[in-house]
Image (cartoon, rainbow, N blue to C red):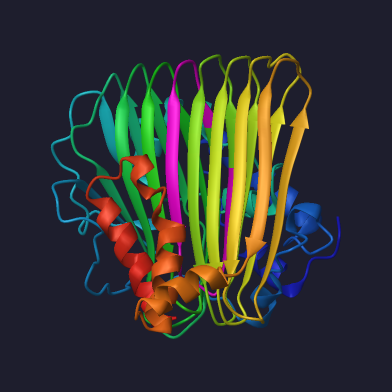
Amino acid sequence: MNKLSATSQSFVDACSISETELPWLISLKKCGIEEFSKVGLPTLRNEAWRYTSLKQLERLDWQKVAEDYEVGELSWLTSGDSYKLVIVNGKFNYSLSEIGGFPEGAFIGSLSEALVSHSELLETHLGRIATSKDSPLLALNASHMADGYVILLSKVELTKPIEILNVGRTDGQAIAYHPRNLILLDQLSRATIFEHYTGQNAGSYFMNSGTEIFVDQGSHLQHHRIFADGPEAIGVASTGVRVGSDANYTSLVLSDGGKLLRNDVRIHLSASGAETKLGGIYLADDEQHVDHTVVIEHEMPHTKSEQLFKGVLSGKARGVFQGNIKVHEGADGSDGQLTNKTLLLSPGTEVNSKPQLEIYADDVKCSHGSAVGQLDEEELFYLRSRGIPYTQAKSILVESFLSEFIDEFNLGELADTFHQRITDWIRAD
């Protein structure tokens, strides 16, 4: 094994394994420790991380998360009726959550509870599509696996959405936490999930989450996220998704917060008729760094994927988009489309866009594209010639660029939240 940096070693030392835990859980944790100890935190020498440095983690003295945290006012994304889950510093908070009354065939609760009530089901799913070998950050997450949220649906169509609020809360010390989440929709189930990452207080925290999602047997999941962590937050969200026969996973992501964000998504279209549609809006200014990395694996014939990510960067912000469509041997008839477009509003901004296609099958329909540019001067001139001030004209063009595909995702009330966050960011910039 390589000699780990002081920070990587401190994360290893913070792992806690009790011999009273389930044997398979002990095995998962030990595998995570072993894999992370081989390489530690990824560096720019790692191809998947060549554009995003986690060197900032080495500059802080990370402390254990306190048990007696106090939470301020909660900010929900919607005002309608929903199941409400609250995760604070990686731990499920039942007193702040509202999850009663879900139908038969559904479990919504904490990972720690599900390890007791649904241990056999968790044994067959945890660590299956977001494995310790996939990424050092997932290995680190597995080594700390203790809590997070679990959503299990079998033959259930939820009539109201699930809203998940992930709160980073500091009390003056830098803290690191590693929640593990599991979502399983089986046998023609259907659900909508709104997930919000936010921070309270202005301190530093490192959120390293791992989420595994199974959408099987004709099920449909709408899973929309807003990453709006605190200004000193470093966030890594690793998500593995498996989409089964005639099933669909749809997700729209908006990121506008945090000091550094890495949104890492890997989707396996593992049966004929599996489909996924992904959208992303990333906004960054000052010296923010935002990285959206997506890999979609077309593993079986007649599967379909769509990706459209758009970003706007200002100040000295840096953006990264890495999108890869991989069509496996034998996955004939696959359809994969990928587009990334980025606007640069300031001379000091930078974006690295890396769309990729890997095709090992015949009779496929795949394309990728990337465009980086500035606001169209002719369009600006046209608006200004109609008496619209420069700042307002600029805002109109940016908002039009970002908002045109939001309505394609059937967000309901959340659509207004997405539009408002875009408007607020533009005005602040």
Residue 37 locus on image (x, y percent): 76, 56
Residue 271 locus on image (x, y percent): 56, 16
Q: Magenta includes 340? A: no
Q: Magenta includes 252? A: yes
* Magenta residues, start to end: 242-265
Question: Which residue is found at the position 28% from the left and 74% from the top?
Answer: 70
Residue 28 locus on image (x, y percent): 61, 40
Give above or below for 1 relative to 328: below
Magenta stretch, main secondary structure class: strand
Front-lying residue, 145 or 193 = 193
Task: Locate the C terminus and report the quarter of the image it occupies.
Answer: bottom left
Front-lying residue, 148 or 373 = 373
Give above or below for 195 relative to 201: above
Instruction: Kindly tell me whether residue 349 is visible in this rendering.
Output: yes
Front-lying residue, 15 or 38 = 38
Give above or below for 222 relative to 377: above
Question: Which residue is found at the position 70% from the left and 65% from the top?
Answer: 52
Residue 364 locus on image (x, y percent): 69, 20
Task: Locate the N terminus and report the quarter of the image it occupies.
Answer: bottom right
Q: Is residue 112 left or right of residue 19?
A: left
